[in-house]
Image: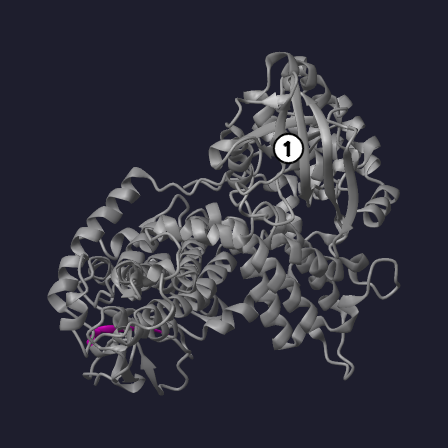
């Protein structure tokens, strides 16, 4: 029973002040990662230690051998483990940790979409043959995700399609896993991803994971999870850009002092850190909510994604600006992050759509 | 990570119900009206009643005048207190200064004051800020000079909130040069030579400028060693900058105390938007501009209440300023109608929140002090300007 005492202002969602003040919402607030999660992050950092691969993999944005190595980290399987309930899937926290490291080095690998697709497929695992399911979990096949509903077998721009074997799409028949039967030409883009134009008539159905309203819900969920992980990656990318900017500001001098001694330089960098820190906290709080089946989990994920995507575009731009003209060159590492902050941020839908969805959800709460 | 909800025991639920009733009965419409009018941040009746229950310092043992409450019970009292909009500024400044008094006062002074802190008869106002400088606390010019067995204090302070209801002024004064020349005192009030003049903020608060003219203070009221003022001050400052509650279940963000105002504004906006229509008859609840603003504000609120450390301080203040402004912009003129008018939205919450928000970025050190802390944590060099302002000319 909710013991909210101001009945005129009660809403059900944790996001409003009434919930902050309600007694049945006294919660712990422990952000510390478990030992296993810390270990996972350390291993990921060792493997994903350099931006060199990002450059080498340009313009396509895929390093097949590197992707194979990454799958040995457990991607995507550890993002899609069976939960306590029959149809629950856990591993979002681990996925967020990995995604952040992917972003920190602008890693050219379809890890995020692999984790999102694996989770969607795991939630509907009774609809797949075990061979396909095992292959998906092992990362042996690359799965692209169509970010918009596909009407009448039409064409659409699909991230990762240029290197994918399968595509997960919401079609007139439901949420489907389809095999790509024709090669897909890469479409150049400034996000550095293997974007491709898929003609859905050149695909063959492998399985229908769900139909009707259930399919729409499943699609909404996977899209929100996708944006959450993109946000996590961009928090990592912004943190990396910030490190580059701070290092530059410590050594670059003007008139005998390091430029970082000027608050006009240091304060925007402090603001960038605020954006990354808040993005990280919002992301992990949402990931925990998803893993624990909380009713407001997807709403929290939208909040985290919207914040992280918006603030990473600002923060990477500030980081590039700090390096002046040098930050504007293709050889500056910050260039990898600036362009991806905008490019990756748009892969899974318009960031501003999340704000409207959050607003609607708050209005319709009981 | 662990964000699990605490399941309340039957006794805790009973306490929650009791606390709701107690605060509702204490913080009446009259109390709220008086607070709006005076901006005192304190109500004597409320304060003493809470003191009698041990609820001013619920974490203290019962023998010391507290309630002996654990983390969950403390959080319950805290939430009930906040939800009732209990005037709480002087309770806060007393709690903060007590940290220093407990550590640095002479034992007899400490023992003398402790029961009064618990029952509400002893109250402290903070005397750091001076007219020429706020954030640079070490640049104190109020002087304390030896005078027989005691001290004679001269100077002026500003933004000394709550001195009108304080029994003691927690005063930082200069006894020597530099940062090692500061000494902390607790000046019993009223005192000859201490005069306070009210200052009103447009956030409905009252604060004061204070003049000290040959104020005599016995040496027993010195806190800590002569010249150790900065160390004595650090305890309360640290408390303010890091802890949000005596309970381990307190807010993770030190900005939540400000962001709650944004939360209330958002709730008021949601109630209004659900029913309201534009002049053309269309519903605000279907207006994408309004939906976008509500979503943005909810996001800003969540960022502010989850962020830790200096980030929480900055976001708590600045998201509230921006967020309330955004809500007002999409609702329009009705959002600016104040309490008491028939058109006021949720009793004027939005317009009050906007006025209150402006001060949030300066309480206890401006948000730029916290940006400077983050800059230091990032490894950036100490702030300074070049020695020469003209460009270098090389031969």
The segment highlighted magenta reads A163-169
Image position of A89 with respect to A135: above or below: above
**Chain designation of label 1:** B
Image position of A291 with respect to A61: above or below: above
User: Looking at the image, which is closer to me, B36 or B136?
Assistant: B136
Image position of B162 with respect to B300: above or below: above
Q: Residue at x 66, y 40 (%)?
A: A1
The residue under label 1 is B171
Q: Position of residue B140 (x, y in %)?
A: 57, 40
Specify whether residue A195 is painted magenta. Answer: no
Q: Residue at x 54, y 22 (%)?
A: B224
User: Looking at the image, which is closer to me, A70 or B372?
Assistant: B372
Specify whether residue A168 is painted magenta. Answer: yes
Q: Residue at x 46, y 72 (%)?
A: A351
The number of callouts visible is 1
Q: Position of residue A248 (x, y in %)?
A: 27, 63
User: Looking at the image, which is closer to me, B194 or B124?
Assistant: B194
Image position of A61 with respect to B311: above or below: below
Q: Is residue A247 visible?
A: yes
Q: Name the side, left or right, on which A73 lies relative to A339.
A: left
Q: Quadrant of the N terminus of chain B?
A: top left
User: Looking at the image, which is closer to me, A63 or B35?
Assistant: B35
- Residue at far left of view: A65
Q: Is residue B54 visible?
A: no
Q: Position of residue A114 (x, y in %)?
A: 27, 64
Q: Position of residue B374 (x, y in %)?
A: 41, 51
Rendered image quadrant of residue A15: bottom right
Q: Quadrant of the C terminus of chain B?
A: bottom left
Q: Residues within 10 Å of mark 1 (few under 14, many from 20)?
A: many
Q: Secondary structure at mark 1?
A: strand
């Amino acid at each position: 029973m909710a013991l909210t005492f101001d009945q005129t202002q009660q809403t059900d969602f944790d996001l409003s002040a009434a919930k902050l003040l309600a007694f049945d919402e006294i919660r712990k607030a422990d952000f510390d990662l478990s030992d296993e999660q810390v270990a996972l992050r350390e291993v990921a950092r060792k493997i994903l230690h350099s931006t060199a691969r990002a450059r080498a993999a340009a313009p396509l944005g895929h390093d097949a051998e590197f992707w194979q190595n990454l799958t040995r980290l457990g991607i995507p399987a550890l993002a899609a483990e069976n939960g306590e309930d029959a149809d629950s899937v856990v591993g979002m926290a681990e996925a967020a940790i990995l995604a952040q490291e992917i972003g920190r080095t602008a890693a050219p690998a379809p890890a995020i979409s692999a984790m999102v697709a694996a989770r969607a497929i795991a939630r509907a695992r009774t609809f797949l043959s075990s061979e396909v399911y095992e292959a998906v979990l092992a990362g042996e096949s690359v799965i692209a995700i169509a970010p918009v509903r596909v009407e009448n077998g039409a064409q659409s721009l699909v991230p990762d399609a240029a290197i994918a074997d399968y595509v997960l799409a919401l079609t007139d028949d439901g949420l489907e896993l389809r095999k790509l039967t024709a090669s897909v030409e890469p479409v150049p883009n400034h996000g550095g991803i293997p974007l491709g134009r898929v003609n859905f008539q050149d695909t063959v159905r492998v399985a229908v994971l769900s139909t009707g309203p259930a399919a729409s819900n499943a699609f909404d969920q996977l899209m929100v999870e996708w944006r959450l992980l993109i946000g996590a990656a961009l928090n990592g990318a912004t943190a990396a850009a910030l490190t580059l900017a701070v290092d530059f500001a410590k050594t670059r001098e003007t008139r005998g002092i390091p430029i970082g001694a000027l608050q006009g330089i240091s304060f925007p960098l402090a603001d960038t850190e605020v954006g990354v820190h808040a993005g990280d906290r919002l992301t992990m709080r949402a990931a925990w909510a998803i893993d624990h089946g909380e009713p407001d989990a997807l709403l929290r994920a939208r909040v985290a994604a919207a914040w992280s995507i918006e603030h990473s575009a600002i923060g990477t731009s500030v980081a590039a600006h700090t390096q002046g003209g040098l930050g504007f060159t293709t050889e500056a590492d910050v260039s990898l992050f600036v362009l991806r902050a905008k490019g990756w941020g748009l892969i899974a839908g318009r960031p501003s759509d999340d704000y409207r969805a959050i607003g609607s959800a708050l209005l319709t709460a009981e | 990570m662990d964000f699990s909800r605490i399941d309340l025991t039957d006794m805790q639920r009973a306490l929650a119900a009791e606390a709701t009733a107690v605060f509702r009965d204490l913080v009446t419409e009259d109390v709220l009206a008086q607070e709006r009018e005076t901006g005192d941040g304190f109500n004597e009746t409320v304060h003493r009643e809470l003191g009698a229950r041990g609820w001013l310092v619920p974490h203290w043992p019962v023998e010391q005048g507290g309630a002996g409450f654990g983390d969950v019970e403390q959080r319950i009292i805290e939430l009930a207190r906040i939800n009732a909009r209990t005037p709480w500024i002087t309770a806060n400044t007393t709690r903060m200064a007590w940290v220093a008094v407990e550590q640095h006062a002479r034992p007899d002074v400490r023992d003398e004051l402790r029961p009064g802190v618990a029952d509400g008869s002893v109250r402290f106002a903070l005397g750091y800020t001076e007219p020429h400088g706020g954030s640079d606390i070490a640049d104190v010019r109020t002087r304390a000079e030896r005078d027989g067995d005691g001290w004679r204090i001269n100077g002026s302070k500003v933004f000394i909130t709550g001195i009108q209801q304080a029994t003691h002024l927690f005063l930082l004064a200069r006894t020597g040069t530099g940062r090692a020349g500061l000494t902390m005192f607790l000046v019993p009030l009223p005192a000859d030579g201490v005069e306070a003049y009210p200052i009103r903020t447009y956030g409905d608060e009252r604060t004061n400028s204070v003049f000290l003219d040959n104020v005599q203070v016995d040496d027993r009221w010195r806190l800590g060693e002569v010249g150790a003022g900065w160390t004595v001050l650090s305890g309360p400052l640290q408390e303010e900058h890091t802890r949000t509650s005596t309970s381990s279940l307190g807010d993770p963000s030190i900005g939540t105390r400000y962001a709650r105002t944004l939360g209330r504004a958002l709730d008021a906006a949601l109630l209004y938007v659900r029913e309201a229509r534009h002049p053309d008859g269309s519903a605000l609840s279907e207006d994408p501009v309004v939906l976008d603003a509500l979503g943005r504000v909810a996001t800003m609120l969540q960022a502010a209440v989850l962020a830790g450390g200096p980030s929480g301080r900055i976001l708590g203040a600045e998201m509230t300023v921006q967020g309330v402004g955004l809500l007002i912009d999409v609702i329009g003129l009705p959002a600016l109608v104040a309490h008491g008018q028939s058109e006021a939205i949720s009793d004027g919450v939005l317009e009050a929140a906007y006025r209150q928000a402006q001060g949030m970025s300066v309480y206890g050190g401006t948000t730029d002090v916290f940006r400077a802390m983050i800059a230091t944590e990032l490894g950036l060099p100490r702030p300074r300007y070049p020695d020469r302002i003209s460009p270098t000319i090389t031969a």
